[in-house]
Amino acid sequence: MSSPAASADQPAVWIYDTTLRDGAQREGLSLSIEDKLRIAHKLDALGIPFIEGGWPGANPKDVQFFWQLKEEPLQQAEVVAFCSTRRPGKAADTDPMLQAILAAGTHWVTLFGKSWDLHVVEGLQTTLEENLAMIGDTIAFLRSQGRRVIYDAEHWFDGYKANPDYALQTLGSALAAGAEWLVLCDTNGGTLPHEVGQIVADVQAWLQTQTHHSEERGTPQLGIHTHNDADMAVANAIAAVQQGATMVQGTINGYGERCGNANLCSVIPNLQLKLGQPCLPPERLQSLTETSRFVSELANLAPDDHAPFVGLSAFAHKGGIHVSAVEKNPKTYEHIAPDAIGNRRRIVVSDQSGLSNILAKARNFGIELHKQDTASRQLLNRLKELEHEGYQFEAAEASFELLMREVLGQRPSFFELRGFQVHCDNLPSEAHWKTRSLATVKVAINDQEILEAAEGNGPVSALDRALRKALANFYPAIANFHLSDYKVRILDGRAGTDAKTRVLIESSNGHQRWTTVGVSGNIIEASYQAVVEGLEYGLMQQAHPLASCDIPSTQLGDNPSTPVT
Amino acid sequence: MSSPAASADQPAVWIYDTTLRDGAQREGLSLSIEDKLRIAHKLDALGIPFIEGGWPGANPKDVQFFWQLKEEPLQQAEVVAFCSTRRPGKAADTDPMLQAILAAGTHWVTLFGKSWDLHVVEGLQTTLEENLAMIGDTIAFLRSQGRRVIYDAEHWFDGYKANPDYALQTLGSALAAGAEWLVLCDTNGGTLPHEVGQIVADVQAWLQTQTHHSEERGTPQLGIHTHNDADMAVANAIAAVQQGATMVQGTINGYGERCGNANLCSVIPNLQLKLGQPCLPPERLQSLTETSRFVSELANLAPDDHAPFVGLSAFAHKGGIHVSAVEKNPKTYEHIAPDAIGNRRRIVVSDQSGLSNILAKARNFGIELHKQDTASRQLLNRLKELEHEGYQFEAAEASFELLMREVLGQRPSFFELRGFQVHCDNLPSEAHWKTRSLATVKVAINDQEILEAAEGNGPVSALDRALRKALANFYPAIANFHLSDYKVRILDGRAGTDAKTRVLIESSNGHQRWTTVGVSGNIIEASYQAVVEGLEYGLMQQAHPLASCDIPSTQLGDNPSTPVT
C-alpha cells in the first residue's frame, strides 16, 4: 500500500475499521474467531483499506485470528494489530506483549498512548517524561522490526484541553519515532464538534511546523477516532475531516463500549456522497447496507431499523399523501438515492395506510388490484383489524401476501389444519431442568386425515417436526424448507405472562427467504401460526416460482440470512 | 408565559417536545390517548416548556387528547396544537381543519408551511404567491382568534439552498402576520452541521433587518427542528443554537419517522451541561433518564441501552483495569457525572469480568466477599459457565444475587421444585385458533408435597398460576408479587425452532422491582425458570427487606415499571 498521498487510486479519506476490536467491546457482543474472519473478508470486499483485527498481546483468541487470516488472506485491505506502549520502566524489545504483536505478522501496527497528564500520573502512575519515552521507544522498536505504525493518541481532546503543551509533546514523540498517522482519539466521547474542529486545526498547524521524520513515507497525516457519548461521534469525525484529518476510525453500525464508536455506515456516505471525499471504490458503496446487516447478524444483534442510511426504515414512506410525491420526484423527500448505498425505498403498510400503499404492495406481489375494486377496501379493513390485534406486516411480507390472496379468493389451499396438541413435562427424577416435549398434529389433504407425532427440544420444535412429518409424503419439497430465523416479541409485557406474543419466522429454500407472522396470547399458538404460513408460502412459491418474496436475490450474498425485525 | 426575552427565570434555549406528534410517526409506534396524557404530564414535570400534543384537525384521537388535558391541566408547560396552512385557493376562516385547531383551545399553535419552491409547485400544485398568502392568511387568522403562533418552515435548508430569496419570502410572510418563532426545519434530514450553521447565521442576519411585527411580544426568535437521516440531528440542533437559535424541537429518545428526530435526551444535557445554556430548571435535569425510560415503556419499545447520556450502558465500565481508576477519579473516564441526568455508573459483570467487578457487585448486594476467598473464584467460574450457556446477568441482577448466594451457601430455600407438566391443545371444533393450556406443578415445602393445576391463556401463564396456587398457603405474600414485564430473546435464531431462548421477567411487589432470567432450548422451561426465581427473590426480599434490588426506589416515580433489557 502506497503512502497516503492524493492520487487517482487513493481514497481522499482512509477508513479504518475497528469493529473487531473496539466494536467487540460492546456489552453483550461476543464474536467467535470464525465470525471475525467472515467479517474481515466482508469488510475487505467492501473496500475498507484498514481493518483492525484485535490485540494479540492481550487476547489469545486474537492470536488465533491473525494466524488463521494468513491462510486466507484479504484481497486488498491491510489488517492491523492493536497494542499499547511498553510498560513504564521496562524495555520494548523484551516486552512479551510486543513479541505477540510481531508474531501476528501484520505490516501495520496501531499503538495507543497517553496524551493526558492526569492519566499518566494517576492511571499509569509514572512520570510525564517516562510516558514520552514509552511512546517513542515502542514505536521505534516496531519500526526497527519493519512495521508501519499508526499512533492512537488516547484521551486526546481532554488531554489537550488540560495541558496542550504536554499533549503535543506526546504527539511529537510518536512523530519523531516514525509514526505515519497520528490519530486523535476522543476516548471519553464528550467533546463537541466545534471543539474538535478547533483542536484538529491547531494540531494540523503544529504538524506543519514539524520536521518530517521519514521523507520516503511522505508527510505524516492526522486521523480521528470518536465515541458517541455526547451523540456526536459522526459529527466529530466529519468536523475533523473538514480540518484536514485524512483517516477516520470507526465501526460498522457504531458498535462499541458504552454509547459506541463513530458509525462508519454514516461516516462513509456523508463523506462520499455529500462532501465529495471518496473513501470506497465507487462501485462498492452500494454494498454498504448489506455489510451492515451481515455484521449485525453475525454479532447476533437486532439490526437498528432506524439507523441512518442503512436502516430498514431509513427510506420508509408512510401515509398516502407523499407516497405518490416521492415516486414522482424522489428528491422532494429523500436526501440521497437509497440504492447508492444498497438500501431501498419502502412503502410502509400500516393501519395508517391509505389505499395507495396497498395498491403499490399488490403491484409488488404481482397481484392485479385496482382502487375501485371492493376487494381493496375489504383488504384495508382486514389489515386494520389484524394490526389492531397485534399483527405487523411491515416485517412479514409473505404473510401479507397470503392475506391479500385470501381476501381476493386467490389463496391456494395445500392442507387443512385439524388441530394439534403439545405436551411438556419436567420430571424430578431426571437431571435438573430436563423437559421433554411431544406434539401431535392432525391435518387433512384432499380430505384425507393425517395424524403425526414428534418430539422436540421444545414445544415449537416438536410441533414443527410433527407438521412436517404429516406433510412430507404429499409435499416432498418441504424437506428443502428450513427456518432461518425465529423472533419473539411480547406485545404488552406489562400484562406479564398473559401478554400477547408476536412471532416472526424467516424461512428459506436455499434461493429465497420469506417471513411470516403469528400472534396469540399463547406463545405456542403464535409460533405455530407463523410456522404453518411459512410452509404454505414456500409451497406457493414452488407452484409459482416467480411470485414475489421479500428479500431480492441480489442481496443474498454469501450469508443466507438477512435480518428482519 | 412571558415573551422569550433573557431573564433569570427563563431558559436560554426553549425546548419544544414533539414526541406526541412527530415522534409518534415512528414505524411500529402507537400511543393511546391515555399514554399521551401520561407522557404529557411527565414532560411537564421534567420542566419542558412546550409540548406539541398533536394535530386535532387531522387526527380524531388528538381532538380527544386536547379535551381530556383540560380536565387535568399541566402545571407549567404550554401545550401546542399543530396544523398546516389553509388549502390553496380557500379561505382560512372557513377551513374546518383550522376550526378544529381552535376548538382544541390551546394558547399556542404551530403551523407548518412550505419553504421550497419545488414543493409548492409540484407538491401543493399552486403558485409561489399563493403559498405566501396561505402562510400569511393562516397565521393572521390564528392571531385574530387570540392564538400565539410558532411557524415551522418545512424543508427549510433544501429550500434555502435551491431558492434562498423565495425561502426568505416565506419567512417574511410568517413574520409579517405575527409569528413569534420561526423554526427552520431540516425535514429530509440530510443537511450537515456546517451548512446548518451557515444558513442559520444568514437567517439571523436577515431577521435583524426585518421590522418587528409585534413590539409587545418582543423580537421574533429562531428555532431549529432536525431529523437524523445523516446521523446529524443533534449536531445540527447544537450548530443552530450556536448561531443564535433559541428553540430546539425534538423528541424524547429521538423517536420519529425514518431515522427519527433530534433526541432531546442528548440535546438537553449538551446544552445545559456543556454549553452553559440552561433549558430545564437545574433540579429537574436529574429526571431526564427516568423520563426517557418512562416514554420507551409507554411506547412499548425496547429502551436503547447504548443511548448517549440516558442509556443503561452509557456509564458502564467493563474490565478490571479501569474500574478502580474510575472509582478513584471519575473524570478520567466519564465525560459528565452520571447522576447529573439521573443515570448511574455500572460495573459490568461479564465473562470478561475480573474479580474486582464481582467484588464490587457483592458489595452492592450487601454480601461479604473478599478477593482471597475461594468462593470468589468459584463464583467467577460459575458465572462464565452460565454466560457461555446464554445466561446474561447484566439485566437480571436478582438472578445474579441468587447465584452469588448459592455459591456462597447463603441461598435461602423456600420451596423445592418436584416437576411440572403443561399441555396445550387446539381442537378443530372450537373457533379457529383457540388453544387451551393446562399446567400441573408439584413442589415440596418442608418435605410436604403439594400438587396444583391451573389453566391459562398460554402455557407460561398456566404454569405461573399453578405455581402460585401451590405456594399461596405457605407464602401469602406472593399475592402481592406480580409480573410487570416479560421479555423473550431467541439466542441463535439461525437454529430455527431449536434455538435457545432467554427469558427475562421483571417482578414487582409495589415498592421494588427485580429482574430474573431463564435460559433453555424449551421456551416454556426458560420462562418457568425466570418465574420461579422471581418468586424466590421476592420471598427473600420479604424476609430481609433491605437487601439490594436492581432499581433504586428513587427511580420509581409514578410509573412502577422501569424497562430493562
Image: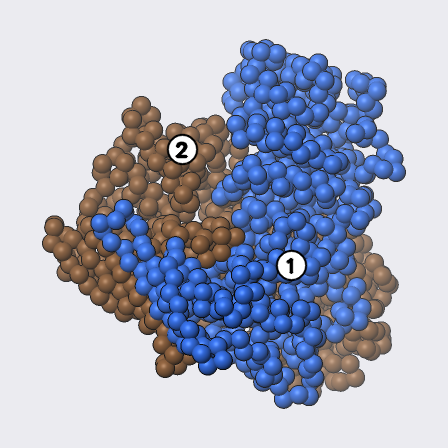
Chain colours: A brown, B blue
- For residue B558, above or below residue A121: above
At horizontal 74% and vertical 36% (from top left) the residue drawn is B75
At horizontal 45% and vertical 29% (from top left) the residue drawn is A320
The answer to whether residue A414 is visible is: yes
Hey, which quadrant is residue A561 in on the image?
bottom left
Hey, which quadrant is residue A404 in on the image?
top left
Q: Which residue is mark 1?
A: B511
Say which chain tag 2 marks: A
In the image: residue B257, left or right of residue A259: left
Q: Which residue is mark 2?
A: A357
- For label 2, the crowd category at 10 Å Cα-Cα, with few meaning under 14, some 14 to 19 and many 20 or more, is many
- For label 1, the crowd category at 10 Å Cα-Cα, with few meaning under 14, some 14 to 19 and many 20 or more, is few
- Secondary structure, mark 2, is helix
Q: For this rendering, which residue is in front, A499 or A336? A: A499
In the image: residue A171, left or right of residue B505: right
Say which chain tag 1 marks: B
Q: Position of residue B553 (x, y in %)?
A: 69, 59
- For residue A222, above or below residue B467: above
Q: For this rendering, which residue is in front, A354 or A126? A: A354
Which of pointers 1 and 2 indicates the residue nearer the eye? Answer: 1
Distance from label 1 to label 2 (Cα)?
47 Å
| Discs 1 and 2 lie in a common subunit | no
In the image: residue B175, left or right of residue A543: right
Mark 2: amino acid: Asn
- For residue B443, above or below residue A302: below
Q: The C terminus of chain B lies in which quarter of the figure?
A: bottom right
Mark 1: amino acid: His
Q: Position of residue B65 (x, y in %)?
A: 59, 32
